[in-house]
Image (spheres, rainbow, N blue to C red):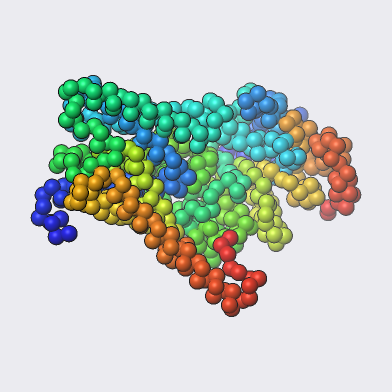
Amino acid sequence: MAQTPSMRRAPQEAFTGATARPRDLAIEVMDLTVAYRDKPVLWDVDMNVPSSALMAIVGPNGAGKTTLIKAILGLVDISAGRVLIAGRPYEQQRRRVAYVPQRGSVDWDFPTTVLDVVMMGRYGALGWIKRPGARERQAAAEALEKVAMSDYAHRQISQLSGGQQQRVFLARSLVQDADVYLMDEPFQGVDATTERAIVTLLQELRDSGATVVCVHHDLQTVTEYFDSVTLLNVRRIASGPTSDVFTEENLRATYGGRMAWLKTASKTEPAQD
Amino acid sequence: MFELFTDYTLRTVAMGAGVLGIVSGVLGSFTVLRHQSLLGDAISHAALPGIVLAFLVTGSNAPLPLIVGAGVAGWVGTLLVRAIVRNTRIKNDGALGLVLSVFFGVGLMLLTYSQSRPDASQAGLDKFLFGQAAALLRNDVITIAALGGVAIVVVALFWKEFKLLSFDPEFGSVLGFRMGAIDVLLTTLVVVAIVIGLQTVGVVLMSAMVVAPGAAARQWTDRLGVMVCLSALFGALAGVTGALLSSTGAKLPTGPMVVLSASAIVILSLLFAPNRGLVWDKWRSRRTMISAGPQERAGRP
């Protein structure tokens, strides 16, 4: 799996200019429209994610956040628009994109072990028919170590708590060894300690040159965790560095009338470091 | 029981039923895990018009043409279910019900028509309704074993892909696998598993062979590999027991006998399997209540 240097070591300041060349962008979403039957879920969305960004996708329920992730991954049919990963269509870049679905999207009563689930992240590199072996086992064990789940490697997955399930999915995406990580609510249902550990992990991923995009729900932690943010409510309201984009005005535009509680949220949130 | 080793007919019957039990047990595990238990019901009922049409076209009741007819009809049925779900607002269970009843209705109509024809009187097509293991010939068993063997080899080859499909198909598609194709392949194998059992167990109750062994096996283990093997074993046990009961005694149809055997296995598993069994569960929760007080009842997450 060859990695383009420009992907791994792209400058953080890709934001700053109109000079940013396309290949400094990890993800480009152009004029994306997705509709279920006649109801638009995403309408004419543009989003550029620079390389080595840690971006949150934020918006109210039904804003199309999950659909946006799935559209980038080709999991839903798109009505119009284009998605590029590192300047090329997703179909040519599959191996460079890892995915953490919502925890609730699978049946955790499936008869398999933690290690086995994590190894699934290597199936793509293995290709058809070939069985996972010692190398895949090793990669999975290392990923479990990174998410502090080594002790659970041989547990049946139905015995895990919500936070542990989340970490297993995270480990599964880590073994994909990708440049771009798309995560759907990686903090959903995890306790404070696990949340901190996951954030640290995501920041390490970013610092090593990967690009991480998370659907995120907790507005209070956006500025602390993420360096960039996309505000979404069917249309894209705003997208860019958190400091520029995560403003009360934009939030109001995103969440509409339901803003009373937001005010207090943004006030208790002075600029972190 | 001793006759099993001496009586040629009995041995043929037992072998045929055993092999079809193994195949439907293996593939049934996946349908159970994918929450598609009704799929087997739809496929087996949908196969009936195919069987009768194959007979009307070829004019013979040799096993292979009838199995091919059943397979094609069952397969078309599943494609129709997919098409209905994709293109209308009808959900999966509704689509399965629709296809099942319409195909089965057409099948019964064709069956009645074919039996009104003079040359069809001894074709014995009606045995496909409830199954007749005693009618199994050596030729039939060879056909069952050959088709079933191919199905099991394919499962072994695509083990990883089928596991992915059953656990997290969207993730599989992100990994670059064509999950639609894997789904069609697995469903095709389920069709094969069902059609090879139709002559023995019958279209009405064949779906039990796809659901019961897998559901029972799930109770005993938390490993997919063990579950599939156990399910094959349970399937074979139910098939042989049912077939023997029906072919020795008062010429009872095999389908109900097989289903009763399979049901016994399921009930025993539901009650007594360690960890997941009801008896075990009760005992454990009572013990927890005694040791920890009623408010700390240990439950599964």
Picture layout, residue A172 above or below residue A20: below
Asked whether residue A157 appears in the rendered view, the answer is yes
Residue B189 picture location, percent across and down: 34, 39
Q: Tell me which residue sits at (67%, 47%) in the image.
A: A185
Picture layout, residue A192 above or below residue A223: below
Residue A101 picture location, percent across and down: 60, 45
Q: Tell me which residue sits at (60%, 69%) in the image.
A: B297
**B209 displayed left or right of A138:** left
Q: Tell me which residue sits at (41%, 28%) in the image.
A: B102
Residue A68 picture location, percent across and down: 66, 35
Q: Tell me which residue sits at (23%, 49%) in the image.
A: B246
**B203 displayed left or right of A9:** left
Which quadrant would the N terminus of chain B be assigned to in this image?
A: bottom left
Closer-to-camera residue (A133/B1): B1
Closer-to-camera residue (A41/A100): A41
Residue B236 picture location, percent across and down: 28, 52
Would you identify the image quadrant in which residue B151 lies?
Answer: top left
**B257 displayed left or right of A244:** left
Give the farthest residue toward the bottom.
B291
Closer-to-camera residue (A210/B68): B68
Asked whether residue A55 appears in the rendered view, the answer is no
Would you identify the image quadrant in which residue A36 lies?
Answer: top right
